Amino acid sequence: MDVSLLLDDLNDHQREAVAAPQSNMLVLAGAGSGKTRVLVHRIAWLMEVENIAPFSILAVTFTNKAAREMRGRIESLMGRSLHNMWIGTFHGLAHRLLRAHHAEAGLPENFQILDSDDQYRLVRRILKAMNLDEKHWAPRQIQWYINGNKDEGLRPQHIETHGDHIQQKMRDIYAAYQDACDRSGLVDFAELLLRAHELWAKNPEVLAHYQRRFRAVLVDEFQDTNNIQYAWLRMLSNTDNNNIMIVGDDDQSIYGWRGANVDNIQHFLKDFESPATIRLEQNYRSTGTILNAANAVIDNNQGRLGKELWTDGSDGAPISVYAGFNELDEARFIVSQIRSWLNDGNALKDSAILYRNNAQSRVLEEALLHEGIAYRIYGGLRFFERQEIKDALGYLRMINHPHDDAAFERVVNTPSRGIGEKTLTQIRETARAHNCSMWQASQLLITDKALKGRALNALQSFSLLISEMEQKATDEPLEEQADIAIKQSGLYAMYKAERGEKAQARIENLEELVTACKQFIVPEEAEEMTPLSAFLAHASLEAGETQADTDQDAVQMMTIHTAKGLEFPLVFMAGVEEGMFPSQMTNDEPGRMEEERRLCYVGMTRAMQKLYITYAETRRVYGQDKYHTASRFIREIPDNCVEEVRLKSTVSRPVHNRFSRSASHEAFEHSGFQLGQRVTHRKFGEGVVLNYEGAGDHARVQVNFDDLGSKWLVLAYAKLESI
Ligand code: ATP
Ligand code: MG
């Protein structure tokens, strides 16, 4: 191939990075400056010019979606498909390593991945077994503690407790949890990384193999690596045989709360052999206005590594700021703008709604549904995390490996078959006493007839069911196995018997699972595994990143964290108000405000052409109305970059004091209506409540009717109904 193709669409600095002689390299640059593009071109360059085989390249990205995109981009650049190249997330790559070397890593061949929900359940069971009260030992906090230690590479025996009673207890819980995982061959997410690290630390010959193999290591989004990931990279690539290129942006470090360490950029410069640093300063993504605004916001942070960003593109449209009077109004505004974007001939998939927390999506989803606009959610309630799917996967996991305690607990009494807490306790105790899985413990209890009549029968039939399912499913294609798991287990019938929309959705999801199995292609790295094992690993690892029919044109919805590295012509950032973003917790923890600001910077810099920032003056949070002011981040944007939008129908804004609860506000609330709510009137049709005044018999509301425009009505006579 003509190698000039690899350099054509690059500026001088990018070209310097792509065509540099082999060495360790840091590309440090702001958002949208082409870091990921450089990484992709560099990989192609290494193969084409330096003759490094795809087999010898390891590339790490932040999400599976990014990994797929990267592979696609390299393949289209090179015009051929690339087997053998390892591209993935840290977790995905660690998983691949552990599968290949499970024995050296001290894991059973068919070890299973424990996702965060399973982990939570397991922690709760451990607490119960240890007779610890969840009120004092919050399971989430324990989970946090365990994962945090693993991220630092610490096993229970490494933790210093300084004689502190609480610390000692936490450590004991961690140890008991780990024993339980080891007994059942379960590996949580943090464990994947720690095990992969220990695998190399304890098996120098395995490490040496990979050091010889991976001559080039490339890492995107390096600012968000944690300490164990850094240690792993360092072990792999700090030899004469390998070079490592990292790209990142300290201003986009947004996972500090989860143990990421932005100082790793500095460590890299110190720890690796003569690294070169290349800075990129030209932004190709956003308009001048968006860029200036984002630069001005991030400028409020201290101690940055310092980068300039400029664009030779046009200034573009101003950033529109909209203040909704509540979250419904905010959502409706966003949807109306998306509607006109669509009417202007644009594609939905080029628009994105970004928010701080997953929970914010619901109201937005409802508004989109109401308007019949298709949307897709990345992250959040993911397909593979839904209750019924996890139930079905639980059966599949039992078929695959009955010693999986997490799966056992999940399905043993779902659907209910009379196996109660008492029997379960007995099974758990037997498992502990014999140091065996709950499945084995059940067999023991059955053979010894150690349970009372009804319980024994119930357990016996469960045991029979699993054995039969296993027999029937062996050698069947994957989708048949899924069908057996769903039907024979009684799950399908259970949800079928439940009425209502929710149950219907569950049935549809179960059917979708069979479809997912049918469409599943065993990935190259999992060729050694059975299709079922591979599918189960896929379900745990990729949860949510691949939602159904990715081809459909739809609005993209996700948290700002998930949007990292992506770009969209039209972006909405919703809920940008004090208390939401920056979040409430920010004030309590040092350094958190700066991380929130970086998150804001990440959000803003996703936008290519047009950015909307919206907030709600009243927001219902956990069923309570909260009164919020615009986020400080909005105030940090220079005036000449923003315009405040008011919808025609919202020109007359509520006149009452927005930030204190007035008597009339209380009375209005008792009337059962809310600002921004949709209502219907017998004669005037449908509309939105815009305003109100007075109380009691004199209370009046202003409604903006879809067909007639705005009208004031006496609440007592209007007979409005909410819809
Ligand atoms: P982020 O920090 O958000 O991850 P990034 O630095 O990785 O951003 P890229 O995603 O690689 O930036 O590039 C941003 C956009 O600019 C992409 O659409 C990319 O194709 C485009 N781009 C990058 N470099 C050039 C160039 N030299 N000429 C034209 N377009 C470019
Ligand atoms: Mg990038």
Image (spheres, helix red, strand yellow):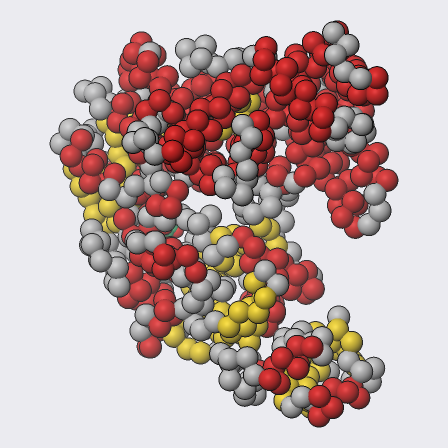
Q: Most extreme residue toward the left, as rendered?
A: 274
Q: Residue visible at 47% across and 36% down?
A: 143
Query: Residue 396: x, y in percent?
Result: 68, 24
Residue at coordinates 48% horizontally, 71% vertically from top-left?
628
**Left or right: 255 with respect to 535?**
left
Looking at the image, which is closer to me, 311 or 476? 476
**Residue 215 vs residue 591, the one in the foreground:** 591
In x, y percent, where is residue 621? Answer: 56, 63
Q: Quadrant of residue 157?
A: top left
Q: Is residue 272 left or right of residue 414?
A: left
**Residue 281, visible in the rendered structure:** yes
Percent position of residue 275, x then y = 16, 34
Q: Say above or below: 506 vs 349.
A: above
Is 343 placed left or right of 514 in the picture? left
- State the quadrant of the N terminus: top left
In this view, the residue in front, 640 or 272, is: 272
Q: Is residue 558 above or below residue 288?
A: above
Q: Is residue 101 visible?
A: no
Task: Look at the picture and state if 185 lies above or below 563.
Answer: above
Residue that appears at 36% across and 49% down:
254
Residue 355 in the image: above or below residue 124 = below
Residue 610: x and y, percent?
A: 44, 66
Residue closest to the far top: 447
| Left or right position of 576 against 387 | left
Q: In which quadrant of the rendered view does residue 644 lie?
A: bottom left
How many marks can you see?
0
Question: Who's the residue at 54% across and 88% down the image?
Answer: 655
- State which quarter of the image contains the C terminus: bottom right
